[in-house]
Amino acid sequence: MVTKVSTGLAAALMLMTAPVFAQTAAPTPGCTATPAQLEANKKVAMEFFRPGVDRVALADPTYKQHNPAFIKGGREAKLSDYEYFKSRFGGPRAGGPGGGPAGGGGRGAAEGPQPPAGNPLEIVMAECDLVTVIHKNNRQDPTAAPGTFYEVFTFDTFRVRNGKLVEHWDGAVINPPAAAAGRGN
């Protein structure tokens, strides 16, 4: 009798979870991406952040940018989103993660205390043709002593089609110019 109850319970649980697995394959109405396509899209987006990669080869000529600083820079240079992308990311990437479209900036060979080492790519999610990469960064606390860092998370979301980056979003903003020191006398 215990076996029949256990078997029945297991069958009921499998039936209840079956729709969840189906939703994973196509989470959005109209989305036809298979799990293999989602993984392939993730690889394209993550490749952008790999040191030494030719990032221009990853972008499609129809590339659309939503980062306001890049849009402004492209307009000022009278370049399309794709042409401005090529001007900013042309050639193999020299540094590590953090210098992507969001302009997080790499660590480089800066003098003074360095932030703790860590894995900058924390979470990668894909749904249909969108991939979001959440980056963990350590930033200097401007209100504390040198060498005092805090953890911050940023993101880059790409639309990937046919193995190419075709659109980009992030949390970047256009900051006001810094106040000039020593002005006024």
Image (cartoon, rainbow, N blue to C red):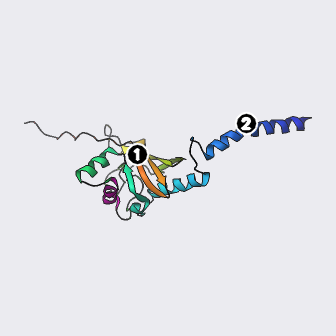
Give the x, y percent position of residue 53: 43, 63
Q: Quadrant of the N terminus?
A: top right
The kind of residue tagged 2 is: Met
In the structure shown, which secondary structural element does the residue marked by tag 1 occupy? strand
Give the x, y percent position of residue 40: 55, 56
Name which residue lies at 46% across and 57% down. Answer: 164
Q: Nearer the viewer, residue 51 or 85?
A: 85
> Callout 1: few (<14), some (14-19), or many (20+) C-alpha neighbours within 10 Å?
some
Q: Nearer the viewer, residue 79 or 122?
A: 79
Query: Magenta stretch containing residue 87, yes or no?
Result: yes
Query: What range of the chain is rendered magenta?
Result: 81-90
> Callout 2: few (<14), some (14-19), or many (20+) C-alpha neighbours within 10 Å?
few
Name which residue lies at 41% across and 58% down. Answer: 59
Q: Find disc 2 in the rendering and name its residue.
A: 16
Disc 1 versus disc 2: distance between alpha carbons?
Answer: 36 Å
- Toward the front, the furthest residue is 30
Q: Which mark is residue 136?
A: none
Give the x, y percent position of residue 145: 32, 41
Q: Find disc 1 in the rendering and name its residue.
A: 169
Please state if 165 lies on the left or on the right of 1 as rendered. Answer: left
Q: Earlier in the sequence, mark 1 or mark 2?
A: 2
Asked if the residues shown at circle 1 and circle 2 are in contact, with their CB atoms under 8 angstroms apart, the answer is no
As drawn, 51 above or below 145? below
Would you identify the image quadrant in which residue 142 lies? top left
In the structure shown, which secondary structural element does the residue marked by tag 2 occupy? helix
Q: Nearer the viewer, residue 125 or 61?
A: 61
